[in-house]
Image (cartoon, rainbow, N blue to C red):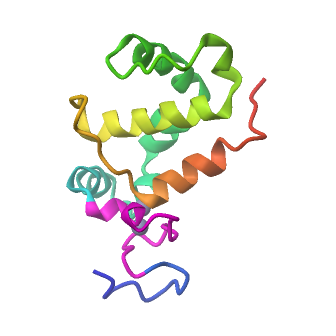
């Protein structure tokens, strides 16, 4: 890896999709190319990054989808009990649900203990979309 990242100097060594940035924690320095299930989705649509996949925008970034999905996560075993309905306006809720959506899209249902590290490119896009000033109301 890193051998063919010749076009973008700003892309870190460990990234192959050209969209990742260095994360605060070294263990978060993961590229979407590190996940076979993401590679499979990307190959299917011939895109280089999971964030360029057409489903990413719909499944992970669409606020209406996230609001709907939120309720299913609330009812599921992922429920933490710290999010309430009023927080639907909170950008953190969208991030939380977006991470869940991405995980479910790529890995399907996971057991409680099977947490996966999401790639930096996806985390960055989700953070930039649902920032503290975010509101669709
Ligand atoms: Zn990458
Ligand atoms: Zn990527």
Quadrant in the rendering for residue 42: bottom left
In the rendered image, residue 33 lying in the magenta stretch gets the answer yes
Q: Quadrant of the C terminus?
A: top right
| Image x and y of residue 123, in percent | 50, 52
Left or right: 131 with respect to 78? right
* Residue at the spot 48% in from the left edge and 86% down from the top edge: 7
Quadrant in the rendering for residue 132: top right
| Image x and y of residue 81, in percent | 48, 16
Could one spot residue 62 in this view of the protein?
no
Left or right: 53 with respect to 9? left
Q: Which residues are magenta?
A: 13-34
* Residue at the spot 65% in from the left edge and 41% down from the top edge: 130
| Image x and y of residue 118, in percent | 38, 51
Position of 85 relative to 130 (above/below):
above
Position of 122 relative to 68 (above/below):
below
Q: Main secondary structure of the magenta part?
A: loop
Left or right: 13 with respect to 107? right
* Residue at the spot 40% in from the left edge and 84% down from the top edge: 5
Position of 102 relative to 37 (above/below):
above
Residue in the foreground of this view, choosing between 136 and 71: 71
């Amino acid at each position: 890896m890193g051998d063919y990242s010749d076009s973008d100097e700003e892309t870190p060594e460990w990234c192959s999709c050209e969209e990742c940035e260095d994360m605060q924690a070294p263990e978060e320095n993961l590229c979407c190319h590190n996940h076979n299930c993401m590679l499979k989705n990307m190959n299917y649509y011939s895109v280089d990054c999971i964030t360029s996949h057409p489903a990413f925008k719909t499944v992970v970034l669409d606020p209406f989808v996230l609001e709907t999905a939120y309720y299913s996560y609330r009812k599921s075993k992922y429920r933490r009990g710290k999010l309430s309905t009023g927080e639907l306006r909170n950008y953190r809720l969208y991030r939380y649900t977006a991470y869940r959506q991405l995980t479910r899209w790529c890995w399907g249902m996971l057991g409680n203990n099977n947490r996966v590290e999401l790639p930096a490119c996806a985390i960055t896009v989700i953070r930039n979309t649902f920032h503290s000033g975010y509101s669709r109301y």
